[in-house]
Amino acid sequence: MSSGLNRRELFRYGSLFATATAFSACSAQEQKDTTTPHTHDASALPTPTKHQPITLRFANAAPTPSLDVATSGTLETARISAQVLEPLLRANVDTGLPEASLATQWELSSDRLTYTFTLRDNVTFHDGSPFNAESVIKNYQRWVHAAADTTAYSRTDYLQLFSGVTAPDQRTPLVTDCKAIDEKIIFTLSRPSTSFIKALTQPAFGIASPASLNDEYHFKKLPVGTGAYTLKEWDGSTATLEASPTYWGAAPVIERLIISTISDSDKRYYALRNGDIDAYDLVAIDNYVPLARSGNLIQPRDPYAICYISINTDHPLLSKALMRQAIAHAIDRHDVVRNNFPQGTNVANDFLPALFMMKNDDTRAYYNYDKNRAKEQLEASGYNGEELTFYYPTGVSLATMESPEAIYASLAANLVSIGLNIKPMPVPWNEGYLDIISKQSTERALALTGFVGSYRDPNAFISRVLAPTSEIVHSAEQSEATYVEDGELEILEESAPENHKLDAPTDEQPKDDTEAPTTEKDDAPAPDTTSLAELPREKITYTQILSAMRAADQINDIDERRIAYQEINLHIALLMPAIPIAYPISSVALGPRVDYYPLSATGIANFALAKAHS
């Protein structure tokens, strides 16, 4: 007959009995000690076991130049900052749609120009100060200040919301005001925007404690926020974070988080195999098979990144569209991708990953590999062997390009083969590479770069690609950044007829996920330039593209938005301020102690959701 108690209950009652017995014995002993002197032997007492926090050791692939997202626009900075600073809204890891965070709800006015956010109650910053409307206003001022900082690449995250150049009058930014009424925050916009609340989910808009900021809105010491983790130590390379005892949300399983930097891919691999780290970012091409054979789990991210060549249209030679198009047609992007990126990476024919389903097939003709045509365009442009500087990062592995030096070598070889005089400009990543290539200059010609999308909207990509040039829109349009009017030169500058169709397979991710992605060379013939003279002499300018982006950002209907951004993709191809190379994939490798890693397409994992064991 069953006793009615299972093993767990028996164990619990047995433990209670043992505790009660021990307590009675202890009480008797205490009574005895009051009458009879007794000498305790301290060495015989059991040593209390100290709690060992569950720790996760994660290795970034690239150095973190700063922990302040307002001064560093790198993925690695955002990854650490996001554990400490929380935004008003956070993105759903699956859909990318905004969800409650420090704001519990929000309302949109009927004219779509005012957002009212209700703030979460009873939240404190790690320094003990209260989170309230006043602290949000202080951070709004910090964001505006960051957008105006022309010395930092990180400003690109803030330009969409706070740059006047994106407005019709070239002065009024998207966000015109932020004020507090009855502990609610009200943002006023100059025009309706479907991307606004999505943009607020970025780590760049994490809320910092006002007490932690100086007069320049930078951190006095370390970032202080309301997040699941507090930042305890930072030596310039390794950040140590501990679970916040005052966090308003669920306590994380990972009690201590150590994020270090291991730039060399092989060293990251061996550190994981040797048990020195528990997980690392950016698995190298050569390490996939060994990791799989050793039983390590590899988690690939969805392709939500772009690698591209930024073209400085302020450069005297590259202000000519013919030169830019010659460079584009000189690059065998299929070969570059096949030899330098992980399997599953696709050639990019625009700047919007397949996730958005906004591909315009006509853009392929503008970037198609055609060496002979590239030579003809180069000759027609009047190029006479002048030197073109080509910047690329060194000493780093990035989610957008594992081996920048090798990618540069492939690209430069293509360009030299058509007669361009390329001067290599290697810049160590930790010397501010992104800041250097984003500054206005007439000397810099080309730069190898890329980024991972930071929120789920096409503006997260297009705005960032155009940011380095849109801020100098006036000088760019006063130069020959549009199509010239010189007879046959104009014919060569035009591209495929509107109804011209290419028969080659597409370069996007195949619809069937089981089908291997194509990286085969596109052997489709280049458009017949002899028939292009009859095309309209359309000119595309930065202002036109920015105006089209403003209009598209106001559209709610997804099908209408898709059509609008397809047209924008085509306009960018016509103007060509950059050349898309690839939609890279990247992966995270996990060690045996990791039970769950919250993978995100943006590369910004929420470590509070991670699970590991001792």
Image: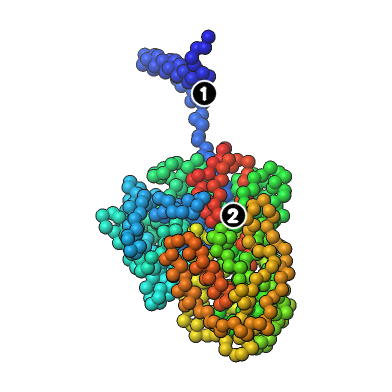
Q: Taking the image as drawn, is residue 409 in sight?
A: no
- List the single residue furthest toward the bottom: 486
Asked whether the viewer can see residue 188, the reply is yes
User: Which quadrant of the structure image shows residue 537?
Assistant: bottom right
Left or right side of 379 for 450: left
Report the number of discs. Answer: 2
**At 63% across and 44% down in the image, what residue appears?**
591
Of callouts 2 and 1, the N-terminal one: 1
* Mark identifier at residue 44: 1
Q: Label 1's element?
A: helix
| Amino acid type of the residue tagged 1 in the rendering | Ala
Give the residue at x 57% y 37%.
614
Q: Secondary structure at mark 2?
A: loop
**Between residues 361 and 97, which one lies in front from this camera angle?**
361
**Label 2 sits on what residue type?**
Asp
Q: Position of residue 397 (x, y in %)?
A: 63, 60
Residue 607 % position (x, y): 51, 47
